[in-house]
Image (tube, helix red, strand yellow):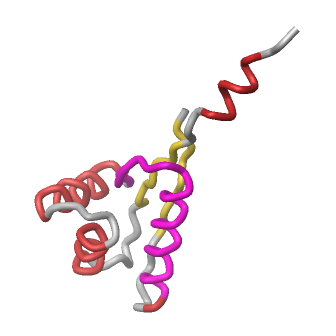
């Protein structure tokens, strides 16, 4: 008997949600630049995300194919590190 559930699982894409966590040492200028450059958010979207972080201690930046999410997360962390910025991100698997 053939079990097609394995095949279905292997062809379904896996997604990841990138979440920025509130950090008192993170500058607003860097965060705005990061959101518009790495995550391609408009100024309005970036300001909404920043406001969400301020009120809820975190905000989801976006949902991407898992490998793209990993790449964007590493790019953001590398940029923050190179500029001496404190950045806390989480990558959450989306089912």
Q: Is residue 3 left or right of residue 76?
A: right
Viewer-proximal residue among 85 and 1: 1
Identify which residue is drawn at 31% across, 56% down.
53
Q: Position of residue 94 (x, y in %)?
A: 52, 38
The picture quadrant where one finds residue 18 is bottom left
Q: Position of residue 89 (x, y in %)?
A: 48, 63
Residue extending farthest to the front is 2
Viewer-proximal residue among 90 and 7: 7
Viewer-proximal residue among 12 and 59: 12
Identify which residue is drawn at 23% across, 69% down.
36
Residue extending farthest to the left is 44
Q: Residue 66: say if magenta.
A: yes
Q: Residue 59: say if magenta.
A: yes
Q: Is residue 24 left or right of residue 45?
A: right
Q: Is residue 88 left or right of residue 49?
A: right
The residue segment tinted magenta is: 58-81
Query: Where is the C terminus found, in terms of image quarters?
Result: top right
Residue extending farthest to the right is 1
| Up-down relation of residue 41 to residue 77 (above or below) | above
Q: Position of residue 2 (x, y in %)?
A: 83, 13
Query: Where is the N terminus found, in terms of image quarters?
Result: top right
Q: Is residue 7 left or right of residue 13?
A: right
Viewer-proximal residue among 55 and 43: 43
The picture quadrant where one finds residue 42 is bottom left
Identify which residue is drawn at 28% across, 67% down.
35
Q: Position of residue 87 (x, y in %)?
A: 45, 73
| Up-down relation of residue 62 to residue 81 (above or below) | above
């Amino acid at each position: 008997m053939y079990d097609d559930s394995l095949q279905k699982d292997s062809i379904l894409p896996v997604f990841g949600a990138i979440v920025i966590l509130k950090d008192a040492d993170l500058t607003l200028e860097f965060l705005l630049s990061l959101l518009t450059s790495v995550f391609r958010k408009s100024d309005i979207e970036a300001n909404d995300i920043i406001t969400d972080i301020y009120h809820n201690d975190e905000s989801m930046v976006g949902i991407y194919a898992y490998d793209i999410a990993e790449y964007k997360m590493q790019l953001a962390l590398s940029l923050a590190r190179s500029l001496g910025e404190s950045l806390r991100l989480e990558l959450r698997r989306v089912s």
